[in-house]
Amino acid sequence: MLIRTFTDQDWSQVWPIIEDVVRAQETFAYDPQMTADEAYAVWVVAPPGRTVVATDGDRVLGSAKMGPNRPGPGAHVSTASFLVAADARGRGVGTALCRDALTWARLAGYAGMQFNAVVETNRTAVELYLREGFDVVGTVPGAFRHRTLGRVGLHVMYREF
Amino acid sequence: MLIRTFTDQDWSQVWPIIEDVVRAQETFAYDPQMTADEAYAVWVVAPPGRTVVATDGDRVLGSAKMGPNRPGPGAHVSTASFLVAADARGRGVGTALCRDALTWARLAGYAGMQFNAVVETNRTAVELYLREGFDVVGTVPGAFRHRTLGRVGLHVMYREF
């Protein structure tokens, strides 16, 4: 598995991963009806942010985007989002993307990384982030309307570097 | 004091309030160098959101914007931001704007209201929100670089309706 900077040639493989995840309404607070153009505008970020793909040969297994969590007086804290293709899960792709983002953010001089909206029932993600040194700072009750579970909480998670 | 929907004629009075607050770097995680056009794009929101002004005769004392906090599965929770002109503080303008936003959000069918980044040293705001029924869900340590105090925490605050 290789993690490298996203290029536009990757989009034809990244968009179906995003589409699958947002339509499912189980892990991402994105508009489930979002179009490919809207997704591109959200996911492919310019410097100081960065978008990457995890690949196995020509195949894109997952993608991540990262950058400052807030402008101005909040720009010393980074954030990141991760997506893994449904049939590539359980192989450590998410962990590799998370570690890559943490390394990038540390080298870029950020003071820490914050996740703003981790769905509390997304155990794979929550456990991964806890393993990678994040704490649950707080949980906004019922802030995510899960397609099958109804209203569940959104964790704010943070790791200082 | 009257609270009413923002119109473009108000901008010449709203922009100096925003400019003053973002340049101070004490309460808002906005780019302190933001231009009037950038501020307009952030502050003046289209439906389903809403921007209002608090006025005293022809004078704008403060402004608020509100709307869904997140897209899709997060869109049942509202958010809002409030600004009060420096020389109009201590007169209840912030409280009136907050109550107006809560009333609007309840009538619009939201399930609650979330603030994502309340600077913990902004006691006026924190105490106002606590009085209006919000809880501190959690505090991201050091997430705001205050111009004079250095790194201080950002509260996530929530009120269910």
Image (tube, coloured by chain):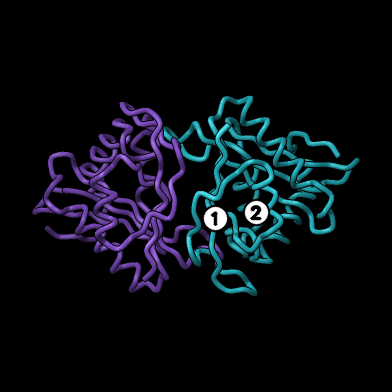
Chain colours: A purple, B cyan
Residue at the spot 62% in from the left edge and 60% down from the top edge: B34
SS at circle 2: helix
User: Which of the image's four quarters has the C terminus of chain A?
Assistant: bottom left
The percent position of residue A151, horizontal first and vertical second, equals 40, 31
Q: Are marks 1 and 2 on the same chain?
A: yes
* Residue A46 seen in the current view: no
The percent position of residue A132, horizontal first and vertical second, equals 26, 61
Answer left or right for A22 relative to B22.
left
Which residue is denoted by mark 1 in the rendering? B155
Q: Residues within 10 Å of mark 2 (few under 14, many from 20)?
A: some
Name which residue type carries label 2.
Val
The percent position of residue A69, horizontal first and vertical second, equals 45, 58
- Residue farthest right in this picture: B57
Q: Residues within 10 Å of mark 1 (few under 14, many from 20)?
A: many
Residue at the spot 77% in from the left edge and 34% down from the top edge: B4
Of callouts 1 and 2, the N-terminal one:
2
Name which residue type carries label 1.
His
Give the chain letter at badge 2: B
* Residue A88 seen in the current view: yes
User: Which of the image's four quarters has the N terminus of chain A?
Assistant: bottom left
In front: A25, or A9?
A25
Q: How many marks?
A: 2
Give me the disc on residue A46.
Answer: none
Which residue is denoted by mark 2 in the rendering? B126
SS at circle 1: strand
Q: CA distance from mark 1 to mark 2?
A: 9 Å
The percent position of residue B149, horizontal first and vertical second, equals 62, 73
- Do the CB atoms of the residues marked 1 and 2 lie less than 8 Å apart? yes
Answer left or right for B20 relative to A65.
right
Residue at the spot 45% in from the left edge and 39% down from the top edge: A141
In front: B149, or A97?
B149
Give the chain letter at badge 1: B
